[in-house]
Image (cartoon, rainbow, N blue to C red):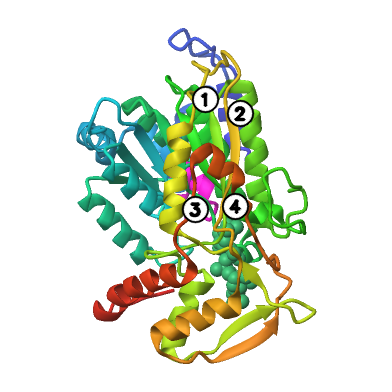
Amino acid sequence: MTQLKPILTHLDSIPSTPGKFKPDKSSPYNLYRLRFHPTLFPRFTLWSFFFIFFIVLLIFFSSPTNPTAGNSRRSLKNSLSPSPALGPNWERRVRASARPRSKTGFTVLVTGAAGFVGTHVSLGLKRRGDGVLGLDNFNQYYDVGLKKARQGLLERSGIMVVEGDINDAVLLRKLFDAVAFTHVMHMAAQAGVRYAMQNPGSYVHSNIAGFVSLLEACKTANPQPSIVWASSSSVYGLNSKVPFSENDRTDQPASLYAATKKAGEEIAHTYNHIYGLSITGLRFFTVYGPWGRPDMAYFFFTKDILRGKEIKIFETSDHGSVARDFTYVDDVVKGCLAALDTAKKSTGSGGKKKGAAQLRIYNLGNTKPMPVGRLVSILEKLLKVKAKKKVIQMPRNGDVPFTHANITLAHTELGYKPTTDLEMGLKKFVKWYVSYYGSKKKKSSW
Ligand SMILES: O=C(O)[C@H]1O[C@H](OP(=O)(O)OP(=O)(O)OC[C@H]2O[C@@H](n3ccc(=O)[nH]c3=O)[C@H](O)[C@@H]2O)[C@H](O)[C@@H](O)[C@@H]1O
């Protein structure tokens, strides 16, 4: 310490403009300076170097437990030096995928494209000649292998799926810079009613923060796209007025999942109001079908029945049956495309509203609620296996006892008319299930 003091005092006297310093030969500290510089200064610099190096290592190699932090680091990396995946070749592929077949076709960004409904909607759009670019974060909520298989299906139809998160603002900007999307079909979400109790943060991350991030990109884009997005029948929560109509109360959500979807509807209102974005929300009613979600009851009941594993059938506290307005995926896709076709243009540009814009919400259900017990007996018949059933009281985990859609509004304004009943829809699902998991003997991790 006594040795360092003279050096530090000497540093205090260095003028701020380098090169103008004249050593004071008369200073009694000159002797110390000459004697200690050669040994102490390199040691000091060496330790500083190691310290800085350690900090840099820590920043670059620490695992991103917070997904948003991970994204922001990736975003930073992207903005500093675009990875080869975001280079000119990547941009060419992005543009080619999004190019419609005809001049009147739409140019659609589908978020959650490797998800269940996202895949079907993407294929439906491509089939009729629209240009489709997919975006999906391939998260591990359920079997990523299934998502990759859906991606393969899309790629064979000429649809590219960019791997990325809707929270990644830099990536979204790159996509909107590369392509003038006319529409965004926003299907990306953290789905599942009961899982919200295990991982509440993922619902906030995808369904709230992610939605805002996407709307920010849409409002800034020039031209602003029209947006159609997936809300949920779960917003009706504890509403007991049946069938559920769009103007019924939705302020009593029974799960955090439902609350984040309801929040999405309010956020949509705000972006419509401030920026003139044209936004249509679709309340899906328990959508099922081929390439479905392994976390949903019809899917894991099929798996468990085939394996001889017990399945739990929920009932209400007064021993009534729990029922859902199960809706077949092809019917929902028709509703999604009709919503896109009837969507008016957004009115804003450069982040500024120019006039009132369209804001809509529709139920896309089947109007025929079925008890879960009935779903199981249809599966038993199709699989030719008797299920090991255990009837238990519905746990308090966010579930609601029944759903039932009034689809008058969607019918009148979108021409929506579901045509697939539960027997036919499950038959198609089981056929796919057996061909995917049965004959191919795919390993499943779900
Ligand atoms: O349309 C909707 O609003 C929602 O539909 C489904 O949610 P849910 O209807 O709860 O679908 P499942 O998890 O497949 O459950 C179907 C029925 O089976 C019942 N169930 C579930 C699990 C189980 O072990 N036993 C059982 O009887 C549930 O109570 C429910 O009545 C989706 O998972 C949500 O993402 C979607 O938003």
Q: How many marks?
A: 4
Select label 1 or label 3 by which is in front.
Answer: 1
User: Can residue 169 be found in the magenta stretch?
Assistant: no
Q: Kindly identify the amino acid type of the residue bearing the numbered disc 4.
A: Ser
**How far apart in space, not on screen, are marks 4 and 2 (Cα)?**
19 Å
Residue flagged by tag 2: what amino acid is it? Tyr
- Numbered badge on residue 232: 4
Q: Which mark is residue 64?
A: 3
Q: Which residue is mark 1?
A: 219
User: Quick check: marks 4 and 2 in contact, CB under 8 Å?
Assistant: no
* 67 vs 246, nearest the viewer: 246
Residue type pointed to by label 3: Pro
Q: Which residue is pictured at 49% across the width and 16% down the height?
A: 349
Vertical relation: 285 (above or below) 409:
below
Q: Residue at x 56, y 15 (%)?
A: 352
The picture places residue 12, in percent across and down from the top left corner, at: 60, 20
Cα distance between the residues tagged 4 and 3: 30 Å
Secondary structure of the magenta portion, mostly?
helix
SS assignment at label 2: helix
Q: Label 3's element?
A: loop
Residue under label 2, please give it.
271
Q: Earlier in the sequence, mark 1 or mark 2?
A: 1
- Magenta-drawn segment: 56-73
The residues bearing labels 4 and 1 have C-alpha atoms spaced at a distance of 23 Å
Q: Residues within 10 Å of mark 1 (few under 14, many from 20)?
A: many
Find the distance from the CA under tag 2 to the CA under tag 3: 30 Å
Q: Please, which residue is most extreme toward the right here?
A: 318
Question: Sequence-wise, which precedes: disc 2 or disc 3?
Answer: 3
Q: Position of residue 355 (x, y in %)?
A: 59, 15
* Residue 188: x %, y % from top left: 48, 48
Among the two numbered marks 4 and 3 on one chain, the one whose residue lies closer to the N terminus: 3
Q: Secondary structure at mark 1?
A: helix
